[in-house]
Image (cartoon, grey):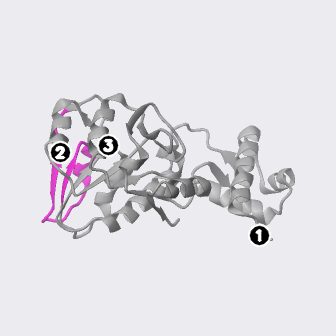
Amino acid sequence: MRNSIKNIEKRREELLTIIKRDGTTNIHKLADAVQVSEMSVRRDCSILQKMGKIKISFGKIDYYQSHDQQESAQIDHINGEIAQAAVDYIDDNQIIFINSSRTAIRILDYLGDKRVNVLTNNLRATNAKLSRESSLVLSGGELRTGSHILTGDIALNSFRNMRASVSVIGCGGLDIKNGLTTTNIHEAQINRMIVKNCQKLLANYTKINKTTNFTVGALRDIDVLVTDAYADATYIQKIRHQGIEVIQAPM
């Protein structure tokens, strides 16, 4: 009988624990440790590599030691797929709010010929190639050293004085009990303002069932969650039960 999704996810977590503990290992050792076929372990490890959790090279399997997982090529690819899936929910002539999220701002890369008006506090937007009929407005505000994000009262007032057709926001964590959270106190107030207009939320699997420092909104404040196929299936079902539409970008 085919294993349930829950059992497969549990086995992958067990494999990840072993790989993290041992540092470097291989398929044969892992199959022996979890008592399943090498084919199943190879398939599991392929998924874990695509998720950015492990590295497979010349038969050796290593755990990613970097704490900044979002910077890995695998996570970057996942975020691109999420952003591309979210574009299907954007129509011509809409006013779009976009926050400081690296994932959210990437929707601009996939808009193509759509005519939109964008307000953002994310300076990465200046690298986007929008259609000639589109407009890009930066919120203004304080730019902290080493940051690409505009914060402060000027930025806040820009979002306060406009109304969006669609808001696209990324978050540091998404949890049913604690809602949407962020790690940066300077961005929290602006994110709260954007969430008031929020119709889309982008979050890769690493953000689901996670809480960070500062609350910016409740789960009920969003209409659509766009995530990836690696997000925990059980938790995604719980989110759907809260009345949230969930779109999972195929990987």
- Label 1 and label 3: CA atoms lie apart by 42 Å
Secondary structure type for disc 2? strand
Q: Residue under circle 1? A: 2
Q: Is residue 204 above or below residue 152?
A: below
Q: Residues within 10 Å of mark 2 (few under 14, many from 20)?
A: some
Regarding mark 3 in the picture, which secondary structure is present there? loop
Instruction: Identify the residue under disc 2.
Output: 138
Q: Residues within 10 Å of mark 3 (few under 14, many from 20)?
A: many
- Asked if one can make out residue 76 in the rendered structure from this viewpoint, the answer is yes
First in sequence, mark 3 or 2: give its number: 3
The residue labelled by disc 3 is 100
Camera-nearest residue between 219 and 119 = 219
The residue stretch that appears in magenta: 117-141
User: At label 3, which amino acid type do we have?
Assistant: Ser
Q: What kind of residue is marked 1?
A: Arg
First of labels 2, 1 by sequence position: 1
* Res 149 visible: no
In the rendered image, residue 202, in percent from the top left (x then y), is placed at 40, 53
Residue 167, labelled with which disc? none
At horizontal 52% and vertical 57% (from top left) the residue drawn is: 241
Label 1 SS: loop
